[in-house]
C-alpha cells in the first residue's frame, strides 16, 4: 500500500492526527504489512525506565515484508543494481526473486554454522551485495546483526564483538576503496585474538588477496553457500524482538550498542522512506552511505526493500577513478532519487563543474542529504548544479538512535529553506528546551532538541547496559528523550540543527566521541594527557584538534605527530585521525580538575580575541601558552 502524503494540507492533517491519536495513526500505517499475528497493543511506554513497546503481541518476520511479500507483484523487478569499485569491472543486479533466493541460502548457511534466533552475528564487510544479503539472512533466522564499518581498526572491531559476544563473524578477504586494496581479513584475525566468543568466521572471496585461514574456525562463503538450500522459512519474531545492534559514539569513551527491535523499526522506516523521498513505483533510488552506518541500515536495506523500491549499491568512493564517478553512476542507472552526505557534496564542489557537466543528470527528481548540517553554499551548489534548479533537496535530520528520519521536508511538498531540515514528520513530537530543561514555546527560539513522545523506530536500550541508555538519553531532561543536538526554531516554525552540544563531533558525517579519540591518543607511550575538540572544517564539517601533553621533550615534533596519528588509526580507524595536534605543557583546568573545553574550542576555531572568563582556572597562564602555540 502506498502511504504517501500527497500535499502540504494533507501533511498538516496527518501531523495533527498523529499527535491527537498516535496509536490509531501508527496502527493504520502498520496495517498493510504481512503479520503472522496482529498486535494486541499498539504502544506502551514510559521515558523514566525507559520502557518502550510498539505493536506488542504481534508476530512477524521483517524479511517476509522486505522480500516474500513482493514476489508475486514484483518478483522480476530489480531490487539492487550493484556497481563495483572499478567502473570497468562487471556489475551485478538482483531481482526481488533472486535476492529472496540468495537471502534464504545465506540464512541456511548461517544455520549450518550453528547460528540461531537471538545469537549475535558480527558483519565486517565491504559494500558488496553479500553484505546486504548477510544482514537480511540474519533477520530471516532471528539472529541479531551487528554490522561494523569495515574502516574500523582491529581494536574497535574486537570491542564491538566482545560487547555483544558475537558467535560468528562474516567478512571478506579484502576490500577495494578507490585505488586501494585493503586486506580486511587480517584485521579480523587480529581482532579475534581477544574474542573467545567467536566460533566461526565466514570469508567471502572478493579481492583474492592471499589470506590465512584458521583451521576449524574459518570457512569460505562460496564453498559453504553451495551446500545450503534456498528454502528457508522465516523465523516468527515478536514485535519487540531485537533486530540489530549498531555501535555508535557517545560522550564517554566506549561506543554504545544501540538496539533496534523488529516491528516498530519496520513500520517507521517504510513510512518515512516513502514519504520523505516520495518514492514512486519504478523509480531508481541511490543512497551513497555505507551499510556500516544507520543510514545504510534504514535507507539502503530495510526502508527501500519494504517499499518495493529499486536501489543502487555502490562499492567505491566518489573520487575514483575521478571526481565524476557519482554523476557517471546517476547517468548509467538513470537514478531518480539521490541521497548523500554534505561532506561529499562539499568535496565534489571543489572539483568544479567539469565533472557534473559531462553526464546527464536529467533523471534526477529528488536530492537528499544526511549526517551533518549542510551549509548554504553547498546547498545552493547541489540544488543548482546537480538538481538543475528543479529537484527538491530533502535535508534529513535523524540519528542512529532514532532509527529513521525525524525532521525533513517531504520532497516536492514542503516548501524548502536552504540549510533547514524544515518540519518534523508525522508522529514526531519535538520540543526545544533551555539549559535548565524549561520548554521553550512558540517560534523564534533556540536551545537543545528533545523529543517528548515515542516513535516506532526509537532506540530501546543500549546492549547489555540499560542504565547507560537511561543516563545518556533520558536523564538530562526527565521525561524527555535528549538528542544531544542544538536546534533553532525560526519565525516560521522551521527547524535548523546547529550541531552537537555534547562531547560528540561530526567529522565528514562520521560521529566520533572526543573521549574516545583522547583514549586512543593516550595509548601513545609518550602521551600523558590529551584533550580533543572539533573545529569548523571546510570540507569535513568538523575537523579534529588535539591538545597533547607529553612526558618528555621531543625534538622531532613531525615524527611525534605521525606516531600519534598512527596510534589513533590503530585504536579506532583512520576516520578518527586528528587534523591538528598541538603539544602543550598543560591544559586549562578548573580547581576541581575539569578541563574548560570552551577555551580549547575557541583556540581551535582561531577565535582567541574573546576567550571569556578564565578566573576559575587553576593556572590561567596556560591559556597564553595555548593561544601562542595554536595551529
Ligand atoms: C548526528 C547523528 C542520521 C544518519 C547519519 C548520522 C547529525 C544528522 C543531520 C542533518 C544536521 C545532522 C546530528 C545528529 N546530523 N543529520 N540533516 N542536519 N545534523 O547518524 O552517526 O547517529 O549521527 O548527526 O548531530 O545528532 P549518527
Image (cartoon, rainbow, N blue to C red):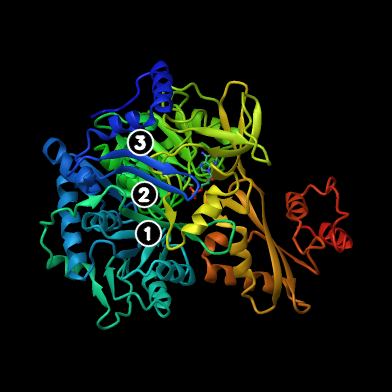
The residue that label 3 is drawn on is: 273
Q: Is mark 1 within 8 Å of ligand 1?
A: no
Task: Tell me if I can see residue 621 in this picture.
Answer: yes
Q: Residues within 10 Å of mark 1 (few under 14, many from 20)?
A: many
Specify the quadrant of the image occupied by residue 73: top left
Q: Are marks 3 and 2 in contact (CB under 8 Å)?
A: no
Residue 297's mark? 2
Q: Residue at x 60, y 48 (%)?
A: 476
Q: Are marks 1 and 2 in contact (CB under 8 Å)?
A: yes
Residue 478's mark? none
User: With 314 as the anchor, is 574 left or right in this view?
Assistant: right
| Residue 552 picture location, percent across and down | 77, 79
Q: Are marks 3 and 1 in contact (CB under 8 Å)?
A: no
Q: Residue at x 85, y 63 (%)?
A: 618
The residue that label 1 is drawn on is: 147
The quadrant in which the C terminus is found is bottom right
| Residue 531 picture location, percent across and down | 70, 62
Specify the quadrant of the image occupied by residue 103: bottom left
Of pointers 3 and 1, the one earlier in the residue sequence:
1
User: With 579 as the anchor, is 394 left or right in this view?
Assistant: left
Observer-nearest of 326 and 27: 27
Of pointers 3 and 2, the one earlier in the residue sequence:
3
User: With 440 as the anchor, is 467 left or right in this view?
Assistant: left
- 600 shown above or below 369: below
* Cα separation between marks 3 and 2: 12 Å
| Residue 279 picture location, percent across and down | 32, 31
* Cα separation between marks 3 and 1: 21 Å
- 215 shown above or below 202: below
Q: Residue at x 46, y 64 (%)?
A: 152
Secondary structure beneath dot 3 equals helix
The quadrant in which the N terminus is found is top left
Amino acid at each position: 500500500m502506498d502511504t504517501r502524503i500527497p500535499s502540504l494540507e494533507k501533511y498538516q492533517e496527518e501531523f495533527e492526527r498523529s499527535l491527537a491519536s498516535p496509536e490509531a495513526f501508527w496502527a493504520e500505517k502498520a496495517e498493510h504489512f504481512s503479520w503472522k499475528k496482529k498486535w494486541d497493543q499498539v504502544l506502551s511506554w514510559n521515558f523514566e525506565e525507559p520502557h518502550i513497546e510498539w505493536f506488542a503481541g504481534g508476530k512477524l518476520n521483517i524479511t517476509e515484508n522486505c522480500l516474500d511479500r513482493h514476489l508475486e507483484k514484483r518478483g522480476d523487478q530489480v531490487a539492487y543494481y550493484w556497481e563495483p569499485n572499478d567502473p570497468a569491472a562487471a556489475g551485478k543486479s538482483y531481482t526481488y526473486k533472486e535476492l529472496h533466493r540468495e537471502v534464504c541460502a545465506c540464512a541456511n548457511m548461517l544455520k549450518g554454522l550453528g547460528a540461531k534466533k537471538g545469537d549475535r552475528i558480527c558483519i565486517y564487510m565491504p559494500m558488496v551485495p553479500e553484505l546486504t544479503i548477510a544482514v537480511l539472512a540474519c533477520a530471516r533466522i532471528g539472529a541479531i546483526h551487528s554490522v561494523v564499518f569495515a574502516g574500523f581498526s582491529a581494536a574497535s572491531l574486537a570491542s564491538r564483538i566482545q560487547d555483544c559476544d558475537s558467535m560468528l563473524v562474516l567478512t571478506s578477504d579484502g576490500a577495494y576503496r578507490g585505488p586501494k586494496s585493503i586486506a580486511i581479513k587480517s584485521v579480523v584475525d587480529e581482532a579475534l585474538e581477544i574474542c573467545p566468543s567467536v566460533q566461526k568466521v565466514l570469508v567471502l572471496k572478493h579481492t583474492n588477496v592471499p589470506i590465512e585461514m584458521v583451521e576449524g574456525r574459518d570457512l569460505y562463503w562460496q564453498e559453504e553457500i553451495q551446500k545450503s538450500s534456498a528454502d528457508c522459512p522465516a523465523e516468527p519474531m515478536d514485535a519487540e524482538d531485537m533486530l540489530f545492534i549498531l555501535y555508535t559514539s557517545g560522550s564517554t569513551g566506549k561506543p554504545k550498542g544501540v538496539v533496534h527491535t523488529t516491528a516498530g523499526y519496520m513500520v517507521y522506516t517504510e513510512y518515512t522512506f516513502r514519504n520523505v523521498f516520495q518514492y514512486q513505483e519504478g523509480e531508481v533510488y541511490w543512497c551513497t552511505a555505507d551499510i556500516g552506518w544507520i543510514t545504510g541500515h534504514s535507507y539502503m536495506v530495510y526502508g527501500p526493500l519494504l517499499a518495493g523500491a529499486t536501489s543502487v549499491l555502490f562499492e567505491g568512493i566518489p573520487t575514483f577513478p575521478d571526481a565524476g564517478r557519482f554523476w557517471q553512476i546517476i547517468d548509467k542507472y538513470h537514478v531518480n532519487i539521490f541521497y548523500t552526505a554534505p561532506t561529499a557534496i562539499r568535496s565534489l564542489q571543489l572539483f568544479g563543474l567539469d565533472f557534473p557537466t559531462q553526464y546527464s543528470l536529467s533523471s534526477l527528481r529528488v536530492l537528499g542529504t544526511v549526517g551533518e548540517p549542510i551549509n548554504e553554499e553547498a546547498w545552493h551548489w547541489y540544488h543548482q548544479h546537480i538538481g538543475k534548479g528543479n529537484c527538491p533537496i530533502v535535508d534529513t535530520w535523524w540519528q542512529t538512535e532514532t532509527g529513521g528520519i525525524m525532521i525533513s521536508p517531504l520532497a516536492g511538498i514542503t516548501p524548502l529553506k536552504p540549510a533547514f531540515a524544515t518540519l518534523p514528520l508525522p508522529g514526531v513530537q519535538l520540543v526545544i528546551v533551555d539549559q535548565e530543561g524549561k520548554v521553550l514555546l512558540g517560534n523564534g527560539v533556540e536551545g537543545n532538541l528533545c523529543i517528548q513522545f515515542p516513535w516506532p523506530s526509537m532506540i530501546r536500550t543500549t546492549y547489555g547496559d540499560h542504565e547507560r541508555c537511561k543516563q545518556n538519553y533520558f536523564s538530562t531532561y526527565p521525561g524527555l528523550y535528549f538528542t544531544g543536538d542544538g536546534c533553532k526554531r525560526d519565525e516560521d516554525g522551521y527547524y535548523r540543527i546547529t550541531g552537537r552540544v555534547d562531547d560528540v563531533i561530526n567529522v565528514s558525517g562520521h560521529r566520533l566521541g572526543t573521549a574516545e579519540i583522547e583514549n586512543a591518543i593516550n595509548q601513545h607511550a609518550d602521551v600523558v594527557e590529551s584533550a580533543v575538540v572539533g573545529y569548523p572544517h571546510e570540507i569535513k564539517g568538523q575537523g579534529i584538534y588535539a591538545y597533547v601533553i607529553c612526558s618528555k621533550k621531543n625534538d622531532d615534533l613531525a615524527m611525534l605527530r605521525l606516531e600519534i596519528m598512527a596510534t589513533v588509526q590503530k585504536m579506532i580507524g583512520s576516520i578518527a585521525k586528528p587534523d591538528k595536534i598541538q603539544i602543550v605543557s598543560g591544559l586549562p583546568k578548573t580547581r576541581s580538575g575539569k578541563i574548560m573545553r570552551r577555551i580549547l574550542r575557541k583556540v581551535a576555531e582561531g577565535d582567541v580575541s574573546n576567550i571569556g572568563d578564565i578566573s576559575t582556572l587553576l593556572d590561567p597562564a596556560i591559556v597564553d601558552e595555548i593561544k601562542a602555540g595554536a595551529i
